[in-house]
Image (cartoon, rainbow, N blue to C red):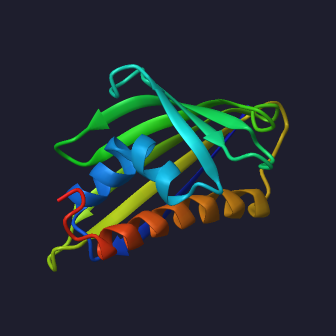
Amino acid sequence: MGVSSYSDEYSSTIPPARLFKALILDSHNLIPKLMPLAIQSIEISGDGGAGTIRQINFAEGSQVKFIKNRVDELDEKNFSFKYSLIEGDGVMDKLEKISYEVKFESTADGGSINKMTSTYYTKGDFVLTEEEIKAGKEKALAMYKVVEAYLLQNPDAYA
């Protein structure tokens, strides 16, 4: 099994509490509304905390029908979230799992720095390509940008 980690950092004018509520705590409601052509629904099994399973069902015509994420840690006070991709058609044949760690931190200007670390656990001799990693990052960033734009246009949402 191979292990590879990658980190990214994004800055936003939106405070961490609003981003955390929209992107993490209420994503199962908000994301399918904002991105209906990509995500059909997000189903939650559990109370939202550690051990909860979030199944993301992609829109018809997508290459992947669904993925399942397991919540490993949810810290609402420190705006941090750890989860693992544990199941998904077309993804898990080469991967044991992917673990993610997301942290939203305040900045002096009232905005936030948002850090994400992805750790890929591959099966056997499989090696992820830069293109595969870049594609995953771009999808995550696209969702982040859609939610950020929604929050900028709706200053009372998740306040």
Question: Is residue 99 left or right of 104 when viewed as pictured?
Answer: right
Image quadrant assignment for residue 85: top right
Comparing 23 with 136, the one in front is 23
Is residue 117 among what the camera can see?
no
Location of the N terminus by quadrant is: top right
Residue located at (41% from left, 29% from top): 72
Question: Is residue 104 left or right of 133 when viewed as pictured?
Answer: left
Instruction: Count up the numbered dots.
Output: 0
Image quadrant assignment for residue 3: top right
Question: Is residue 114 left or right of 144 when viewed as pictured?
Answer: left
Percent coordinates x, y for residue 45 in the rendering: 45, 21
Residue that lies at the very extreme toward the right in this rendered image: 125
Percent coordinates x, y for residue 47 in the rendering: 33, 22
Is residue 28 among what the camera can see?
yes
Location of the C terminus by quadrant is: bottom left
Percent coordinates x, y for residue 58 in the rendering: 67, 44
Residue located at (28% from left, 50% from top): 21
Question: Is residue 130 left or right of 43 when viewed as pictured?
Answer: right
User: Image height check: is 122 above or below 8?
Assistant: above
User: Image height check: is 116 above or below 66?
Assistant: below
Comparing 12 with 108, the one in front is 12
Percent coordinates x, y for residue 146 in the rendering: 48, 67
Residue that lies at the very extreme toward the bottom in this rendered image: 109
User: Image height check: is 50 above or below 14?
Assistant: above
Residue located at (63% from left, 38% from top): 57
Residue located at (74% from left, 38% from top): 65
